[in-house]
Image (tube, rainbow, N blue to C red):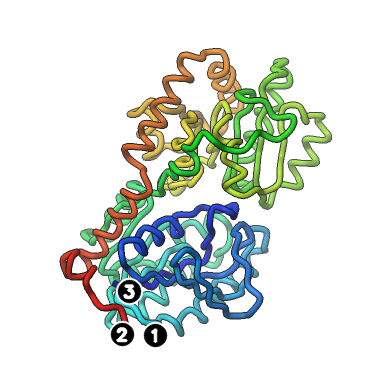
Amino acid sequence: MRILYFYQYFSTPRGSWGTRVYDFAKEWVEAGHKVTVVTSIYSKSDLKATKFIERQNIEGIDLIVLNIGIDNRQNPLKRIWTFLQYSFMSAYYALREPADVVISSSGPITVGVSGLLARYFRRRKFVFEVRDLWPDTAIVMGFIKKKWMQKLMYAFEGFCYRSAHLIVTLSPGMRENILKRYGKLNIESVTNAANLELFGNPNQKQLPTGVERGNYAIYTGNIGKVNNSELLFKTACILRDRGEDNLKIIMIGDGQQKEELIKKVEQENLGNWLQIRNLISKEDLVPMVQQSLASLIPLASTPLLDTSSPNKLFESLAAGVPVVQTTNGWIRDFLVEYNCGITIDSTQPEQLADELIKLKSDTDTWKEMSRNASKAAHTLFDKTNLANKMLEAIESAYGKNADDVRNKVIR
């Protein structure tokens, strides 16, 4: 089967971004399929390009790299422009590149254009992958403010859902949201995966100088309002005021509030309780997660974010690290069911400080949550199993049994 995957943020473990598409595509290639990913240059990815359009091959995955730079620090107009550029240029490959199945991975929702073109002009099977609920995400982040544009985007969202032969969501919450709004559709929930080969491997690099095992909680990702980064700053202030000199928070990432928070840390003399570090590769991140007291997912409290499926959740589980998070959707329910983490109020830094102090002092509870996290990663979120689950759903939508698809001659 020839799979054409439209995804703007492709990265390998050498980058600082999620590797879902890389991991799944590798599995599919090893199963005998041909996978081509049309992508761009994301600031957190390890991809580079010297030409405006460049073909590359990474471990059997064919890449068509559109040299369009995307960065979370870009202003909303610049971000929208990069999305439109990618959508316009990728349309050519939707109409010309050999494919049996075309996957459009959203957000942004504009990536759906390529899948729709392949579906209606070439009669290819169209899979719409939903990583975030767009345009809701763009509206919350302030990218789309005009009412007429929001209505247009919602109409386009509905058209993508109804046109897709298969919808793949990254969380059960997203699946429920779409079914509630649009009725019966062919939807499969395939979460992000726990990379056990990487984060579950104990033979990793040493911690950086000045970082001690078990004396810190870690946050990785974007530093901004949506990610509730201010909560971590306030928590660090509480840890300082309580004299918790052997407990700190380490933030690793980039984003709109990073420089502001660095200045506030200096002004408050918080360096011993809150460290803000630059992006590092997944490979270098592994020991930092593995040896942390807890992994923090402090998202802002909104119904939209309750459906999210953040990479850091699955990385933490693979590393056997308890999770402390703030959403009120499927992640909260999961942590309760498997007893591998804690949910707190997104507006209560005192509660976060209390829970971190408890985890540090109660080693029996920490060890139990750690074991449960690792067990959940192995039984529920193994990347090979999830890649196969998505492939089986694609094969079913393709309309042939797995053996027929695998034996198809790839031209």
Note whether 257 is above or below 126 in the view shown: above
Q: Which residue is mark 2?
A: 122
Classed neighbour count for the residue bearing mark 1: other residues with Cα under 10 Å, few (<14), some (14–19), many (≥20): some
> In which quadrant of the rendered image does the N terminus lie?
bottom left
- The image's mark for residue 95 is 1
Q: Point out the tag, 3 or 1, that comes first from the N-terminus.
A: 3
Element carrying mark 3:
strand
Q: Point out the tag, 1 or 2, that comes first from the N-terminus.
A: 1
Q: Are marks 1 and 2 in contact (CB under 8 Å)?
A: yes
Task: Determine the image quadrant of residue 159.
Answer: bottom left
> In which quadrant of the rendered image does the C terminus lie?
bottom left
42 displayed left or right of 26: right
Residue 82 rendering spot, x and y as whole percentages:
59, 72
Q: Amino acid at mark 3?
A: Arg
Q: Which residue is mark 3?
A: 2
Let me know if residue 326 appears in the view: no
Give the mark count: 3
Q: Amino acid at mark 1?
A: Leu
Q: Are marks 3 and 2 in contact (CB under 8 Å)?
A: no
Element carrying mark 2:
loop
The mark lying in front, picked from 3 and 1, is 3
Residue 249 rendering spot, x and y as whole percentages:
65, 31
Classed neighbour count for the residue bearing mark 2: other residues with Cα under 10 Å, few (<14), some (14–19), many (≥20): some
Element carrying mark 1:
helix
Classed neighbour count for the residue bearing mark 3: other residues with Cα under 10 Å, few (<14), some (14–19), many (≥20): many
Task: Determine the image quadrant of residue 234.
Answer: top right
Q: Point out the tag, 3 or 2, that comes first from the N-terminus.
A: 3
Residue 264 rendering spot, x and y as whole percentages:
78, 37
